[in-house]
């Protein structure tokens, strides 16, 4: 019995590895096949099913099927609190942003600031997205503070952006653009309080 259980676990882990490899090489059909097998297998753990939903969500997002992607990413969050869940929270905010629901996107980004604290890369990505939302809402000083907070976080721990080394330059360019717009808007007054990444939620 124990040997059978171990064999089943090994098979599930092999399917998980095959699904991940298939995604990396762009074999979408294989990803969908492996994901379907994992989700429907009663022996699969929540971690297995979470990863399956994660990769299906990534495929749907790449296809522009935002509603389907959102559904998959929501499942990831329900089943796991690992790094894939952290990325899923960010992707949900991004989906709302792409669907032009800026209020929901902002709300999700602010939530991510707390829920993704254990995964600083995805927390920072959410704050950068939040700055884009603030710019579109013409909340330029909030956008400025968000971007400055990101740069402070990167300066204090450069390893945060190992996955995306160009992020610092991107953020600096965004900040420069925001500062230029602020300088061009003579009748815009700055909010009175200081604000940091931790306080962004209080500024809304």
Image (tube, rainbow, N blue to C red):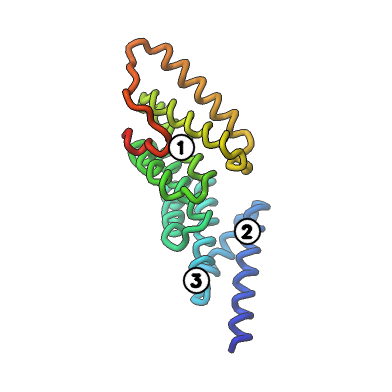
- Residue linked to disc 2: 20
Which residue does the image show at 60% across and 58% down from the upper left?
29
Which residue does the image show at 47% across and 48% down from the upper left?
117
**Foreground residue among 16 and 150:** 150
- Residue linked to disc 3: 40
Please tell me in which quadrant of the rendered image residue 22 appears. bottom right
Q: Is residue 54 above or below residue 153?
A: below
* N-term-proximal mark, 3 vs 1: 3
**As drawn, is 49 to the left or to the right of 10?**
left
Q: Residue furthest bottom?
A: 1
**As drawn, is 1 to the left or to the right of 109?**
right
Q: For the residue labelled by badge 3, is the local secondary structure a helix, a strand or a loop? A: helix
Of the two numbered discs 3 and 1 in the rendering, the one whose residue sits closer to the viewer: 1
| Residue 19 x/y as whole percent | 62, 61
Q: Residues within 10 Å of mark 3 (few under 14, many from 20)?
A: few
Please tell me in which quadrant of the rendered image residue 172 appears. top right
Q: For the residue labelled by badge 1, is the local secondary structure a helix, a strand or a loop? A: helix
Q: Are marks 3 and 1 in contact (CB under 8 Å)?
A: no
Q: For the residue labelled by badge 2, is the local secondary structure a helix, a strand or a loop? A: helix
- Residue linked to disc 1: 127
């Amino acid at each position: 019995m124990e040997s059978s259980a171990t064999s089943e676990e090994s098979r599930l882990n092999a399917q998980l590895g095959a699904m991940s490899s298939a995604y990396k090489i762009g074999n979408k059909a294989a990803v969908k096949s492996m994901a379907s097998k994992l989700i429907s297998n009663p022996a699969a753990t929540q971690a297995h099913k979470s990863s399956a939903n994660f990769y299906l969500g990534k495929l749907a997002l790449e296809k522009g099927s935002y509603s389907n992607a959102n559904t998959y990413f929501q499942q990831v969050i329900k089943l796991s609190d690992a790094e894939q869940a952290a990325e899923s929270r960010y992707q949900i905010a991004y989906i709302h942003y792409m669907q032009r629901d800026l209020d929901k996107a902002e709300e999700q980004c602010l939530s991510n600031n707390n829920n993704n604290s254990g995964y600083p890369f995805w927390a920072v990505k959410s704050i950068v997205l939040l700055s884009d939302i603030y710019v579109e809402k013409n909340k330029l000083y909030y956008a400025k503070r968000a971007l400055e907070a990101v740069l402070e976080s990167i300066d204090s721990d450069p390893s945060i952006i190992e996955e995306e080394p160009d992020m610092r330059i991107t953020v600096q360019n965004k900040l420069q653009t925001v500062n230029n717009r602020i300088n061009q808007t003579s009748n815009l007054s700055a909010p009175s309080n200081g604000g940091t990444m931790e306080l962004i939620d209080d500024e809304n």
